[in-house]
Amino acid sequence: MTETAPPPRPGPDAPAARLGEILRVDHAGELAAVHIYRGQRAVLNKAPGKDRIAYQLQEMEAHEAEHLAAFNQLLTRRRVRPTLLAPIWRVAAFALGAGTALMGEKAAHACTEAVEDVIEKHYAGQIAELQDREPALAAELSRFRDDELAHRDQAVSEGAHAAPLYPLLSAVIAAGCRTAIKISEKL
């Protein structure tokens, strides 16, 4: 299911305001993703026999850092402020990453799957909304969405569904992501 774009707002500044929301929330999401992977790596880099997953997490974090750098540039170029909640999202995301890693490798993968599934749908809605008005940005978001899909698929293939209490863990993480998206668009 793809997120639907909000109805157009009236007024001459409406497209710029909506673009600001899109850039702000996407920046916040990539910031959080970097910190989730950092939290997971903080736990799993020190765990014996976890070199393989630590390397995978490092690669995924590098993709997210690339996305974050692109949004940092876009925010500056488009004169959009980042979310006021960035410090909270950093801490919360790191805690989510570390917490799921402490639950085990499968729970860390379940976290990745839940987050990336929500983000893929979120990006898909934005791409549809922007493809005519901002085709270059829509193309960049498509590239980022493809990375998120690859992360999700890798997490599933690595056993995300075998995590302890997977349905509950996945549902709670997905709900938290959707809530953070709504808040970050506005604040």
Image (cartoon, rainbow, N blue to C red):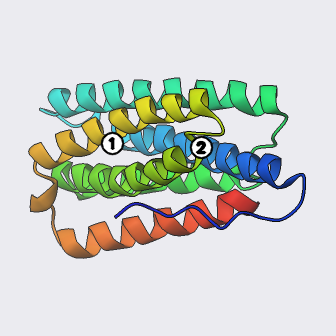
| Image position of 186 with respect to 127: above or below | below
- The residue singled out by tag 2 in the image is 130
Q: Residue at x 17, y 33 (%)?
A: 50
Residue 20 at x, y = what percent? 76, 47
Q: Which residue is mark 1?
A: 43
Instruction: Indicate the secondary structure of the residue bearing disc 1.
Output: helix
The amino acid marked with disc number 2 is: Leu
Residue name at image x 81 percent, y 43 percent: 81
Decide: is 89 above or below 140.
below
For this view, does 114 lie left or right of residue 185?
left
When asked about the image quadrant of residue 110, the answer is: bottom left
If you read the primary sequence from the N terminus, does the residue marked by circle 2 or circle 1 appear first?
Answer: 1
For this rendering, which residue is in front, 149 or 49?
149
**SS for dot 2:** helix
Q: Quadrant of residue 61?
A: top left
List x then y, in percent, for residue 49.
12, 32
**Residue appearing at x 39%, y 66% in the figure:** 174
* Residue at the outermost front position: 132
Q: How many marks?
A: 2
